Amino acid sequence: MEQNILRRSLTEISNGHIFYAIGMMKEYADNYGVGQWRDELERISCDYELMLDYMGRGVIDPEREKVHSRISKRLERCIRNIMLSDKIKLSSFYIEAYSKAGGVTLETEQLRSVLENFVSEQAMTGLLGADDEKTKNREIYENHIGQMSRFFHTIIVSTQWTDGMGKHIAEILSSPTIDSFDAQLLVSSISIAVMNHYDEQKTLALANIYRLSTDENIKQRALVGWVFATAMEGRTTEDVISLSNDNEVANELADMQKQVMFCLNADEDNQVIQQDIIPELMKNQNLNITRFGITEKEDDPMEDILNPSAADERMEKLESSMHRMEQMQKEGSDIYFGGFSQMKRFPFFNDMANWFWPFFIEHPAVQEALEKIGKADFLSDMLASGPFCESDKYSFLLTMKTVFERLPDNVREMLQGGYDLGSIVNDSDRNSAAYIRRMYLQDLYRFFRLSMHKSDMKSPFADANVYLFVANKAFAGTEIDNRLAELLFFMHKRKMKNAFMVLAKRFMDLEQNRLSTDFIHLSAIYYSEYANDASKAMSILKEAWDNNKIDDDQMSLKILGRLSLLEKNFELAVACYLRLHDLYPDNRIYAQNYCVALMKQECYYDALNILYRLDYEHHSANTSRAMAWALMGEGKLEQAQALYDKLLLDESTAPEDFLNAAYCHWIQGETNTAVNLFVDYKEALGNRELSADWLTAEMENDSRMLARHGIKPVDMMLMSDLVEKKVRGTD
């Protein structure tokens, strides 16, 4: 209730109704109390009353607009601070953060001093002897990790930053004089803070860090935090406009949008892995795992005699499954979420800061694990090339610490010997902005999905208005709009229906897109495949075709050709597929579809000439089916029957083969054979629900072919009855 009143007050401020908002807050203070913020609220009220008084007396103030803006900001900050105070009392997330902050206050110069002193202390240990250096380093890191955890939580519960503080913090965290890992951690803290409780200055800090930092790891964390914070608030600013209108930034944002969608698809990807890939891998259990790699066990000699190709087949299937997982990972899928999601229950993750530390050997938890495991060259291998996000690296090590002594000797030997665990990612990819951003998004996704406070936080992955940030009003009118087509093609390819529909509506509403080929194509996809309005899609494409706008647009021609067949506009279908066939003469599918369209127009001779060539170059059952139908249309019934006989003996026989073979025999006067084949067709349909006139309906669909050979409507009705009689066994 209280939070709702506060949110309504903020809405009134955004609408320019300062007087009304102040009135609401005075009433709120009387009813619920505002603690330490009462005096500030009174000062704001007095300043605004004075401003109104000057206005009422006709005083001309050239600074009036600036004063009004300052008062608005002060009131907003005051309200947001009151909201935060309430959250710290009621929310487990904020209660935990407040407790772990330990009463530390956020003083910018103190922060700078702590961060820079840590770097100096590290450097000084190099002057000590080896043993002393190790001991001193451990002491330094234990103290520093605790100190950074307190700063992390302090930022989360910090009140609204004052003007200029965002810029100052950005300068500190972008400075080369502080440790990159420290900066990354605090950037994440600012991000988590502002995602859960908006603060203009914290958002500005993230934008400035993204601009200023030369460290790609810091830069990408700041970008992700800034984007999500902006989308959550839905408020455009000068920073949003200036950054989003930069072409390079817009490219990064488009790529980030794709990566976010891959995160959201983690459960589905895990299902594919668990149901399709892992079972295949489990079939191949005749493998030895050693420090030298994976090798096959000795096969049974009798198996070699009875099934000499079995070993090769097993290895091929294994390699295929591994390749499929590798491809999913390269494309951006979060293939490790399912496996590592069960490894986030260690006490290590009870400290929120530990979700966001980049993995480093000196972390006390890592040192403790290594002491138990012993020599572990595998760790450096994993860090060098393993495709895991940072929190998964900690999970992996903590799991190893737990199970290491129970592992088989050969596995322990492999791990201690430095076997390469993840050579998938090369150095250039691993250091790229795209890869860094993807890994960080996976860390964020795990935090909001799996942390102990997941139900008490605002997750950017739970709100479509946030995770589909390119459609958020805060980014409207920026360079992002010019990336929507690219993103729509991406989402359509990966069958992300809901996201496609949201973005498509926005894309189609933009006037600048209406003359583009992409608009025609994507509108057609939207109406034909998502909005279930084939006629609308047809109308759009037909108009474009008539105006020669899609003569060379492969995708639009494909859709128009398919829709034309469905709408029984066979003349247009022929024209579309002819154009595609001319543009892509080696494309077998376009050639086949062109033949289908020709046959719908009863141009069987022309279709046959193409089908003969296709059959010679790419023999397939589908080509044989098309040839048989064309031959039947041309009256070459014996040749057609010969093809149908082969199809009915083939293991790839389709139910329609029985139907068409029945037609062929019927046309030749072989009524009994036709009846039997019609019955076989019904049986081949299996459990499909059929109407009483199922066969008559099929004949109606093919009535042009049957009429071509003298079969009349009355013949169709009689044949249907003959088949029904046969089915009922009443001969």
Image (cartoon, rainbow, N blue to C red):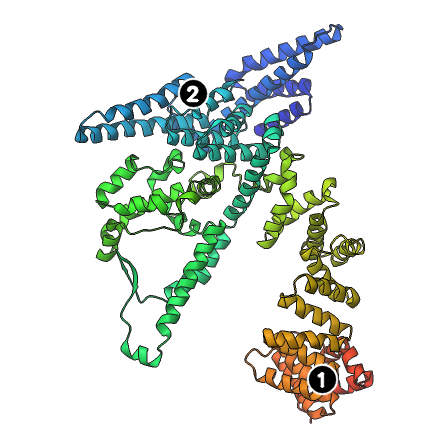
Q: Left or right: 445 with respect to 19?
A: left
Q: Residue at 49% of width from left, 42% of height from top?
A: 434
The CA span between labels 1 and 2 is: 85 Å
User: The residue tagged with tag 2: helix, strand or loop?
Assistant: loop
Q: Residue at 71% of width from left, 54% of height from top?
A: 524
Is residue 395 visible in the rendered structure shown here?
Answer: no
- Label at residue 106: 2
Quarter of the figure with the C terminus: bottom right
Residue 668 drawn above or below residue 61:
below
Query: To which residue does mark 1 refer?
Result: 663
Image location (x, y in percent) of residue 35: 51, 18
Image location (x, y in percent) of residue 438: 47, 43
User: The residue tagged with tag 1: helix, strand or loop?
Assistant: helix
Residue 316 drawn above or below residue 551:
below
Image location (x, y in percent) of residue 409: 21, 56
Q: Left or right: 505 with respect to 321?
A: right
Mark 2, Cα crowd under 10 Å, few <14 / some 14-19 / many 20+, is: some
Residue 597 drawn above or below residue 403:
below
Q: Amino acid at mark 1?
A: Tyr
